[in-house]
Amino acid sequence: MTMASSTRRTDILSLIHLRSDGRRPHEIRHMSCHLGAIPSTTACGSAFPTSACSGSSLVTMGLTQVLCVVKGPCDVGRRSEELPDRAVLEVVMQTTPFAPPGDRRNINPTTDRRLIEQSHLLQKALSASILLHLYPKCKISVTVMVLADDGGRLEAAINASTLALMDAGIPLKDMVCACSAGRWNAGGNDEIVVDLNRREIQAATGTGGGGGGTSDMIYLPVATMPQRGTIVLSQCESRLSGGAEAFARVLEAAMVGCQMVMEVMAAAVRARGAGLWKAKEGRAQVILNEW
């Protein structure tokens, strides 16, 4: 009886080959997408561009929730910042004080190195898909606000930005879908998992006071254009054991996860299009507190 009471939930899940949140290794977190989260005729608050937004989206991946607002194409403002052959893509990534668990602090997106790095990665991933040459001497602003952070905020930000750009009517080559994959030695079994949460990322990278990650732990966020089969972002900050073959296995698992994410995002786009068509025909239903 004492042994049963001292058994942890994680040990039980490990025995039946489930992860800490009850998912199977190749199962992504529950994902929901909402296009048009902020009406385009409404002026945004101080955290977002001051004028009316062109498109918006709200993406939830597990306990991670991200809101994205797109403004533009519009005038650059400063003539010196104009580009004669393409539009300027401005990306700002912010986080709320209550987003990460634990210490609640106001983080300045202009000085926080992690946010600056992720804003740069987000800009590079989106630039690979947006047809910027169609809007010379213009600017497209993408503002991302992390409302809840349980791991994978960069992946959620990429997915939310893609949907917000589509809601704004910005032409894209393909949807940019992001998902992460990881590998570590758990109980003697070399497992590959997709869509890592905060606890799994801390175990793979050695952050959050959990000690340094070992060579058997890998965290790899990946962004792809699934219909083209193109990888636009792949970042691995962990040490690899097993060489290129081990990296290829993790990368393949992440690409499969991106494909599953794309199916959820495509369903949300179709639902948004159907809703707009019903509204055009005068058959729309107003639902309060949908999410």
Image (cartoon, grey):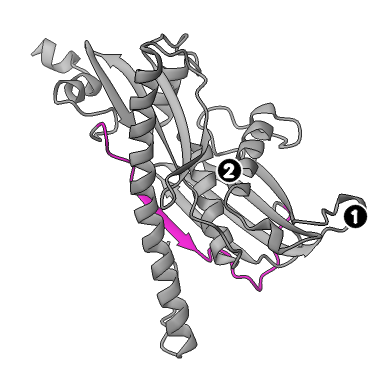
Q: Nearer the viewer, residue 29 or 97?
A: 29
Disc 2 secondary structure class: helix
In the depicted structure, whether residue 25 falls above or below residue 287: above
Disc 1 secondary structure class: loop
Q: Tag on residue 78? A: 1
Q: Nearer the viewer, residue 275 or 80?
A: 80
Based on the displayed image, in which of its 4 quarters is residue 193 positioned?
A: top left
Q: Residue 43 lies in magenta, yes or no? A: yes
Based on the displayed image, in which of its 4 quarters is residue 70 positioned?
A: bottom right
Q: Which marked residue is nearer to the observer: mark 1 or mark 2?
A: 2
Residue type at mark 2? Ala
Q: Residue 205 lies in magenta, yes or no? A: no
What residue lies at 44% left-to-right and 11% top-to-bottom? 213
Which residues lie in the magenta part?
Answer: 25-46
What residue lies at 69% left-to-right and 27% top-to-bottom? 113
What residue lies at 38% left-to-right and 10% top-to-bottom? 241
Residue type at mark 1? Arg
**Residue topped by disc 2:** 125
